[in-house]
Image (cartoon, grey):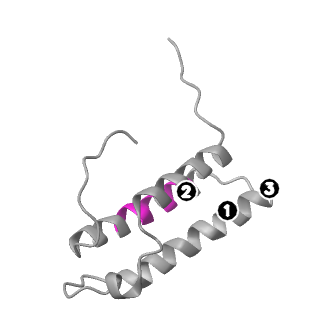
Amino acid sequence: MSHQRRPATPVAMRELIQQIRSAIPLDMPEAQACSDSCNACSLKLLEYLSGELDNWEARLAAGEVPGLADLSQLARSARKIHRVLQKDGLIEAQEHTGA
């Protein structure tokens, strides 16, 4: 039985951060983020997520090793925010492939 080796958690966190940054438009202008159909404050959600990503990048640079719970929490937050942005029509629904 062959076991596929998973990346170390710092590597996995960097990859997750990159995936989130490419999937979610964190630099969306305020005028665009505040739409008529607002299920949650998209602008505040984007600011929150951007802050979380910046925080983790700084922690990784300082040598901190995230746990699997940290990875899971960041991924869960990003998925929830992504869904809200889709409901608000700010990003298009995409086919989910992998991950």
Q: Position of residue 53 (x, y in %)?
A: 58, 66
Q: Tag 3: residue type?
A: Gly
Q: Which mark is residue 49?
A: none
Q: Is residue 2 left or right of residue 41?
A: right
Q: Residue at x 59, y 27 (%)?
A: 5
Q: Residue at x 29, y 46 (%)?
A: 96
- The quadrant where residue 45 appears: bottom left
Q: Nearer the viewer, mark 3 or mark 2?
A: 2
Q: Are marks 1 and 3 in contact (CB under 8 Å)?
A: no
Q: Which mark is residue 57?
A: 1
The outermost residue toward the top is 1
Q: Are marks 1 and 2 in contact (CB under 8 Å)?
A: yes
Task: Tell me if mark 2 has few (under 14), some (14-19) or many (20+) residues whose alpha carbon lies within 10 angstroms of its own.
Answer: many
Q: Position of residue 2 (x, y in %)?
A: 52, 14
Q: Which residue is mark 2?
A: 17
Q: Residue at x 40, y 42 (%)?
A: 99
Q: Quick check: 30 above or below 15?
A: below
Q: Which mark is residue 63?
A: 3
Q: Nearer the viewer, residue 95 or 83?
A: 95
